Amino acid sequence: MDENKNMSRREFLRRMGVGAGSAMALMAMEPLSVIAKEKPQKPVANRMTYRIQHGSGEQISLLGFGMMRLPNNQEEVNKLVDYAIEHGVNYFDTAPMYMGGQSEVLMGNALSRHPREKYFVATKMSNMSQNQWNLDAAKRMYEQSFQKLKVKYLDYYLLHGVGNGGMDNLNGRFINSGILDFLLAERKAGRIKHLGFSYHGDVHVFDWLLDNQEKYHWDFVQIQMNFLDWRHAGSRGRRGRGGDADAEYLYNKCVKTGVQCVVMEPLRGGSFGNMAPELASKLKAVHPDDSTARWAFRWVGSHTNILTTLSGMNRMDHLEENVKTFSPIDPCTDAENRLLAEIADQMSGFPDIPCTTCSYCMPCPYGVDIPTNFATYNEAVKTHVLPLPDKSSAGYAAAFKTFSDAYKKALPDKKKWAEACQDCEECLSKCPQSIRIPNQMARIVETLRKA
């Protein structure tokens, strides 16, 4: 008893997290239709589903508001935030680099109109450029987030985009610079309530950070997770660079480590909303009134170690639909999980490019419109215009013309075409999906030249 009384708060929370993680590891062996029972309470109709943050006991809405792309209009953002809070959403995620810094401003103005206990703020150390890899620059970015968000403490703070560039990048950005030590001290002082990181790219970095959990005591980890990336992330053009891993591996390692997950890209950049018709029809046959987005959210929400699921909701109709999906969440059944796994297997066979149109890669120094090139190519894959049939086929000429015309319509300025790519590789370290962008540009150029 005396030992427990003298235990530090950090050590207590850490042990709570580890204990919860052990329980989660056992629960992960159950079917995905089993949802976490953080409190002995039944879901209430029209009430948001909440998850309990390990250690602190905070109730976090399973639907989180991702604010990377917002209307650049304060009144519109206020309406979205008001509706979200009114309907139980309390986790709001942003970053200094979103919208060129405007996202934090818009979010801070909107949230500060509400009582502080009504919302949890998440933002990031977005020191992507090497001139930001020094402690003074990082401190300025950190303090500016407080000012823009109009808060005295940050509920959830992340090292932004670790993994890109491997261990050398992690060491340069956070370890050798002293920035991570500074953030750990800020957490101890209470200005940061929960410290974590968002992961993209080299899985060795992910493993190293969690393998050092005893030293850093990560409170949460943000990963990309959806029913396609669950087992097909590595097979879709990503694993070749840095040893990336499927979401199944990332999620299970977090469970074993006792660290809860925040999910990004549950809709894979909105691509599930444009699923091939023959695949979407399989879902409609089960739930005729449900959108593919609702299916994707239900699948993520069925996993018990998820703290919150981020969705970029810049339109009121999207916000309203997502709130309904999570109020309360309807976990997927075993049969529904099998169906989504089958669809994921089929989708992984389509030769598309795993781009979420986040535009982190832009601007290109040579003027290439990278996201539009990839989106146009992927649309042709989805509608089965691509891959082109054999040249001897009667349908070759028509298919080529369809793709060529659609490409020219989407990119009327030839300077933005894939052929303008000079393989400079400046975009590689910026891409959260670790896409070998020059290689994919060459793929588009080759397709257009098959005439």
Image (cartoon, rainbow, N blue to C red):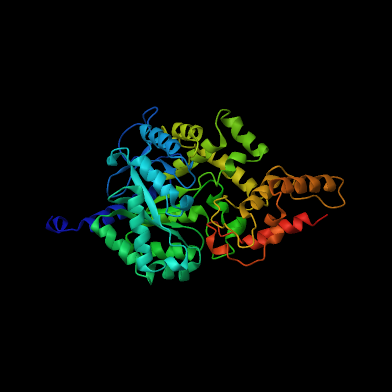
Residue lying farthest to the left in this orientation: 2
Residue 187 in percent (x, y) is at: 28, 58
Q: Is residue 410 above or below residue 258?
A: above
Q: How many marks?
A: 0
Q: Nearer the viewer, residue 406 or 109?
A: 109
What's the residue at 25%, 55% (across, down)? 190
What's the residue at 62%, 41% (across, down)? 275
Q: Is residue 12 visible?
A: yes
Q: Nearer the viewer, residue 198 or 177?
A: 177
Residue 327 falls in which quadrant of the image? top left
Q: Is residue 336 above or below residue 255?
A: above
Q: Is residue 442 visible?
A: no
Name the side, left or right, on which 375 lies relative to 137.
Answer: right
Residue 6 in percent (x, y) is at: 14, 58
What's the residue at 57%, 44% (across, down)? 341
Quadrant of the drawing holding the N terminus: bottom left
Quadrant of the drawing holding the C terminus: bottom right
Residue 333 in percent (x, y) is at: 49, 36
Name the side, left or right, on which 212 lies relative to 117.
Answer: right
Q: Nearer the viewer, residue 271 or 113?
A: 113
Residue 197 in percent (x, y) is at: 40, 57
What's the residue at 43%, 42% (across, down)? 65
